[in-house]
Image (cartoon, rainbow, N blue to C red):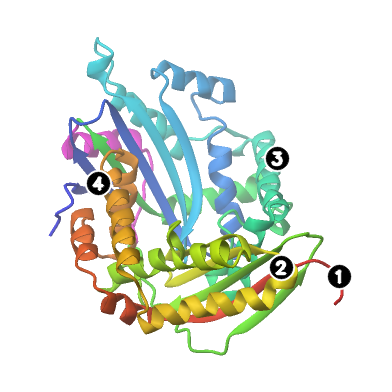
């Protein structure tokens, strides 16, 4: 049963999700294209949207491409590449003003679909392949983005800890791919990869605004000129059990501040009945400024410049990030482990419970003020196969008890400790 307010349909093997509403002055359009993370395709898939945003068949020059957005009353267009679980997701976004606010017979939603459809299915080409200059220039763009991770040691440590923790799983791969794979990507190989991606990716098109499912289905039929033969569903993966011995990895680089990252595995994923309790667990542990890691590791002991945790419910992984003075490594590990043990023993205050519920409540309510946030939340349903509205999740969170959080904490097991430190020998 669909209780989210989105109406569902399909055309050309695109799953279509429309939320008809007059609340917003714009149309929010999101197109998600997802494929399994694979070492042999991840870099080419990541490069694809960078090249597609350079020009289309009708607007082959990048200046023409941008001018067309201006002709759509300054419509917003952008994309992102990220991973959810073991999937690599390319997301295109458009934000277009509702026709009724500009006067005349503008048909801006139709024109926006014509633009997005052409970006996706009719990119600028030469000699039967994607433009050579665009491929070469965007290869360099992606290379610089990947190199910037190395220069940002906080991000670098976070990525390296995941690589070590998931070294035998697709999740180890960065969604932007690998630098070593970029030089070998030529226009013909990228074109072949793009065509395969266009055929095989799971495509979900979302629209929020003053429209109807029927109208959007017709727009897809008219403007997305691609003959897709199938549309695969996302497969929710079982979480990898965290019952092996904790592995410690120490990496040495030219750094003045240590980066201590710890990875935990859990059997609780987005579709699990304990998901709300896992959200509470992460929030109390390190998700917010009142959390145990922030208060005890950073504030009381002054051991960390930052200390927080994140939870990926699509993968079943939680990560702890902290920046510490290098000599404080042992003490920091000990105190972080104490916080994990407090969670497992249910040593949680009423204030920690109430503040965490308030933070989650505010986030879920604020989400209702953003069309794109509503879309992103609903896309979790597509990824996981679990129908759970924001209102459902909020009600579940409100009823979570300390015992529920303690039981969830028992499902989080420390898997990997990663420490980035200086090159000095002790």
**Secondary structure beneath label 4:** strand
Q: Taking the image as drawn, is residue 168 in sight?
A: no
Q: Residue at x 40, y 77 (%)?
A: 343
- Spatial separation of the CA atoms under disc 1 and disc 4: 55 Å
User: Which residue in the protein does label 2 denote?
Assistant: 420
- Residue beneath disc 3: 136
User: In x, y percent, where is residue 115?
Assistant: 41, 29
Q: Is mark 2 on a helix, strand or loop?
A: strand
- The span from disc 4 to disc 3 (Cα, nearest Å) is 36 Å
Task: Give the image location of residue 310, x and y in percent.
Answer: 47, 63
Tell me, for residue 17, which label it has, or none: 4
Q: Give the range drawn in magenta.
A: 211-232
Q: How far apart are marks 1 and 3 (CA)?
A: 40 Å
- Number of the front mark, 4 or 2: 2
Q: Residue at x 51, y 62 (%)?
A: 294
Disc 2 crowd rating (10 Å Cα; few below 14, some 14-19, many 20+) is many
| Residue 193 position (above or below residue 410) | above
Q: Which mark is residue 25?
A: none
Compared to residue 96, the image places residue 426 above or below, namely: below
Q: Is residue 133 left or right of residue 45?
A: right
Residue occupying the far top of the picture: 104
Residue holding disc 1:
424
């Amino acid at each position: 049963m669909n209780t989210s307010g989105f109406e569902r349909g399909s055309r050309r093997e695109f799953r279509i999700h429309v939320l008809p509403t007059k609340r917003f002055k714009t149309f929010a359009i999101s197109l998600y294209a997802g494929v399994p993370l694979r070492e042999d395709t991840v870099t080419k898939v990541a490069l694809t949207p960078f090249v597609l945003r350079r020009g289309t068949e009708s607007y082959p020059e990048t200046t023409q491409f941008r001018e067309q957005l201006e002709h759509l009353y300054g419509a917003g267009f952008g994309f992102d590449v990220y991973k959810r679980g073991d999937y690599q997701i390319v997301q295109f976004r458009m934000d277009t003003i509702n026709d009724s606010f500009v006067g005349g017979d503008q048909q801006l939603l139709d024109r926006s679909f014509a633009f997005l459809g052409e970006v996706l299915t009719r990119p600028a080409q030469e000699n039967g392949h994607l433009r050579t200059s665009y491929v070469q220039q965007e290869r360099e763009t992606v290379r610089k983005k990947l190199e910037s991770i190395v220069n940002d040691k906080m991000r670098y440590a976070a990525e390296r800890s995941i690589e070590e923790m998931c070294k035998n799983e697709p999740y180890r791969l960065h969604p932007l791919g690998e630098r070593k794979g970029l030089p070998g990507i030529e226009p013909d190989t990228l074109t072949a990869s793009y065509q395969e991606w266009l055929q095989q990716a799971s495509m979900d098109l979302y629209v929020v605004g003053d429209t109807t499912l029927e109208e959007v289905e017709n727009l897809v039929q008219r403007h997305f000129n691609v003959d897709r033969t199938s549309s695969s569903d996302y497969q929710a993966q079982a979480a990898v059990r965290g019952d092996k011995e904790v592995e410690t990895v120490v990496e040495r680089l030219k750094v003045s501040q240590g980066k201590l990252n710890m990875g935990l595995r859990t059997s609780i994923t987005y579709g699990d009945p304990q998901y709300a309790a896992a959200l509470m667990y992460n929030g109390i542990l390190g998700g917010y400024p009142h959390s145990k890691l922030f208060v005890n590791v950073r504030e009381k002991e002054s051991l960390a410049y930052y200390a927080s945790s994140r939870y990926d419910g699509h993968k079943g992984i939680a990560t702890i990030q902290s920046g510490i003075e290098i000599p404080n490594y042992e003490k920091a590990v000990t105190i972080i482990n104490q916080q994990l043990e407090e969670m497992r023993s249910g040593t949680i205050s009423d204030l920690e419970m109430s503040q965490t519920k308030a933070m989650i409540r505010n986030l879920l309510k604020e989400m209702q003020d953003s069309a794109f946030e509503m879309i992103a939340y609903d896309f979790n349903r597509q990824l996981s196969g679990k129908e759970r509205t924001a209102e459902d999740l909020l009600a579940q969170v409100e009823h979570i008890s300390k015992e529920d959080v303690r039981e969830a904490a028992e499902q989080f097991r420390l898997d990997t400790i990663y420490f980035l430190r200086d090159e000095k020998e002790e």
